[in-house]
Amino acid sequence: MTDAPPPRRLDLRGLKCPLPVLRARKALREAAIGDLIVVECTDPLAVIDIPNMVRETGDRLEQQRSEPAFSAFHIRKVAP
């Protein structure tokens, strides 16, 4: 059993570019190393923008999936 906190969920459905990336970046800045953030977006550009943002921050995209209604990204905070 781990003491890891539960994932923080960001429901960003309905927001258009650049708001999903800006809000996800802010959440990562506020997160502790090891925290998991689950971002859910409906903006079609998020499938490009979120992975690019994660590469820039040095954090880790653990999972990305596209559902019919939204895309979800599991981002692990690894960089200070």
Image: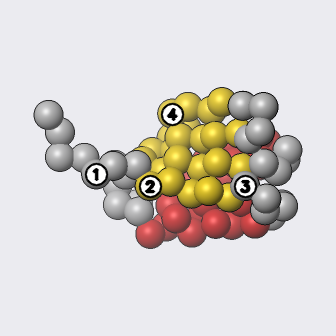
Give the spatial CA distance, label 4 vs label 3. 20 Å
Determine the residue positioned at 41% across, 62% down.
31
Determine the residue positioned at 64% across, 40% down.
72
For disc 2, the neighbor class at 10 Å (few under 14, some 14 to 19, many from 20) is some
Instruction: Read off the residue under disc 1.
Output: 5
Identified by mark 3, the residue type is Arg
Left or right of 24, for residue 14: right
Label number found at residue 8: 2
Decide: is 26 above or below 21: below
Decide: is 31 above or below 61: below
First in residue order: circle 4 vs circle 3: 3
In this rendering, the label closer to the viewer, 4 or 3: 3
Give the spatial CA distance, label 2 vs label 3. 15 Å
Label number found at residue 13: 3
* Residue 53 % position (x, y): 67, 52
Decide: is 25 above or below 52: below
Label number found at residue 20: none
Task: Pick the quarter of the image with the N terminus.
Answer: top left
Proximity of marks 2 and 3: CB atoms separated by less than 8 Å: no
Q: Quadrant of residue 13?
A: bottom right
Instruction: Read off the residue under disc 4.
Output: 62
For disc 1, the neighbor class at 10 Å (few under 14, some 14 to 19, many from 20) is few
Determine the residue positioned at 75% across, 66% down.
19
Residue nearer the viewer, 66 or 68: 68
* Residue 27 % position (x, y): 52, 65
- Element carrying mark 2: strand
Proximity of marks 2 and 4: CB atoms separated by less than 8 Å: no
